[in-house]
Image (cartoon, rainbow, N blue to C red):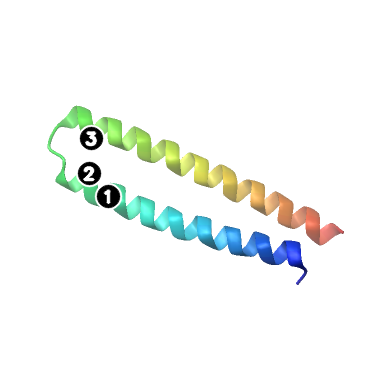
Amino acid sequence: MNFNKTILATEMEKIQKTENIMYKYYDDLLKELKNPKIKERVRFLRDQELGHIKMMTNVIAILSDYILRD
C-alpha cells in the first residue's frame, strides 16, 4: 500500500468514527429534547452533517480509486 493510499484509508476511518460519534450524540440529544420545533431543527442539523460526511466519504473513495489506477 502506497503512502497516499494509507493516508486515505486513515482519513476514511476517522470520518466513519466521527459519523458514529455524531449520530450517537444527536440521538441522545433528541431523546432529551421536549420542544418539537427544537427537535426539528436538531434533526435538520444532524442531516446536514451526515450529508457532509457522506460527501467526504465519496470524495475519499474517488481519490482511492484514482490512486489505484496509477
Instruction: Kindly identify which residue carries mark 1.
Output: 27
Figure label count: 3
First in residue order: circle 1 vs circle 3: 1
Q: Can you give x and y, in whole percent of width and height, for residue 50 in the image?
A: 45, 43
- Placement of the C terminus among the 4 image quadrants: bottom right
Q: Say whether residue 70 is left or right of residue 10.
A: right
Q: Give the residue type at disc 2.
A: Leu
Instruction: Kindly identify which residue carries mark 3.
Output: 39
Q: Mark 2: which secondary structure?
A: helix
State the image quarter where residue 46 is shown: top left
At 49% from the left edge and 40% from the top edge, which residue is drawn?
51
Q: Say whether residue 9 is left or right of residue 40.
A: right
Q: Do labels 2 and 1 touch, CB within 8 Å?
A: yes
For residue 62, above or below residue 37: below
First in residue order: circle 2 vs circle 3: 2
Q: Give the residue type at disc 3.
A: Lys
Instruction: Kindly identify which residue carries mark 2.
Output: 30
Q: Residues within 10 Å of mark 1 (few under 14, many from 20)?
A: some
At 21% from the left edge and 31% from the top edge, which residue is drawn?
38
Q: Give the residue type at disc 1.
A: Asp
Q: Mark 3: which secondary structure?
A: helix
- Placement of the N terminus among the 4 image quadrants: bottom right
Q: Can you give x and y, in whole percent of width and height, for residue 64 in the image?
A: 72, 57
**Any mark on residue 36, and which?**
none
Q: Residues within 10 Å of mark 2 (few under 14, many from 20)?
A: some
Q: Residues within 10 Å of mark 3 (few under 14, many from 20)?
A: some
